[in-house]
């Protein structure tokens, strides 16, 4: 079979599935080595970019997904009913950041970092499919552990958690000072 035929099959599978498909599953279906499938997918991705197509292939961990380019969103909403957009408030973003950088993490650990209850924020993030339950901690009470989802990676345009930006010490010190100033303002009110 020619490379173009394999690519057509991959394209058909990704289009039909509409979700991530592991490279290993594609390799099994095509009866090819995983590295051969990776090369085929890379060529497809490059071709889509060169041809300025409306779709793209995103790599998410060890899987790939076909999706619409973000730049086309405004046109999509003119045709389809406006998709429900989830608004990430400062509280949700702060909670999501803690989970992303500290996962797996319990609610209690998040609350220790934030200094306030986070049950509502965690529940909203689970509802938005940005966070999921990863299991339970082997400790008294067996608290739930939370971590980010594939949807989180897709939404923030990263392939894995390792691609999240690393904060330098100056930024950390600045954030600490801002938090202390906020705490002092609340105490003085």
Image (spheres, rainbow, N blue to C red):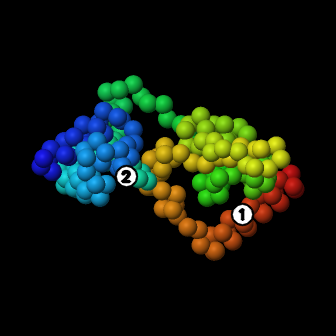
Front residue of 28/121: it is 28
- Quarter where residue 185 is shown: bottom right
| Position in image of residue 52 (x %, y %) | 21, 49
Q: Is residue 23 left or right of residue 98?
A: left
Which residue corresponds to mark 1? 178
Find residue 59 and name its label.
Answer: 2
Image height of 169 relative to 106, above or below: below
Q: Is residue 188 left or right of residue 150?
A: right
Q: Are the residues flagged by discs 2 and 1 in contact, CB closer than 8 Å?
A: no
- Quarter where residue 29 is shown: top left
Front residue of 45/118: it is 45
Residue for point 65% across, 57% down: 102
Q: Is residue 2 left or right of residue 20?
A: left
Per the model, the C-alpha gap separating discs 2 and 1 is: 36 Å
Residue for point 73% across, 40% down: 119
Residue for point 62% across, 70% down: 171
Query: Which one is in front in this view, the residue at disc 2 or the one at disc 1?
Result: 2
Residue 94 visible somewhere in the drawing: no
Of the numbered discs 2 and 1, the one sitting upstream in the chain is 2
């Amino acid at each position: 079979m020619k490379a173009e035929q394999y690519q057509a099959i991959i394209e058909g599978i990704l289009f039909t599935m509409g979700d991530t498909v592991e490279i290993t599953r594609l390799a099994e279906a095509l009866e090819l080595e995983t590295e051969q499938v990776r090369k085929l997918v890379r060529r497809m991705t490059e071709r889509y970019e060169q041809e300025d197509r409306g779709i793209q292939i995103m790599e998410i961990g060890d899987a790939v997904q076909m999706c619409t380019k973000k730049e086309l969103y405004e046109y999509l909403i003119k045709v389809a009913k406006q998709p429900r957009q989830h608004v990430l408030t400062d509280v949700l973003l702060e909670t999501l950041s803690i989970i992303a950088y500290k996962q797996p993490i319990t609610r209690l650990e998040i609350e220790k970092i934030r200094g306030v209850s986070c049950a509502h924020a965690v529940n909203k993030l689970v509802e938005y499919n940005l966070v999921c339950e990863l299991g339970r901690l082997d400790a008294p009470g067996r608290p739930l552990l939370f971590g980010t989802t594939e949807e989180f990676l897709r939404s923030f345009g990263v392939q894995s958690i390792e691609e999240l930006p690393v904060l330098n010490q100056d930024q950390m010190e600045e954030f600490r000072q801002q938090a202390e100033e906020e705490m002092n303002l609340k105490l003085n009110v």
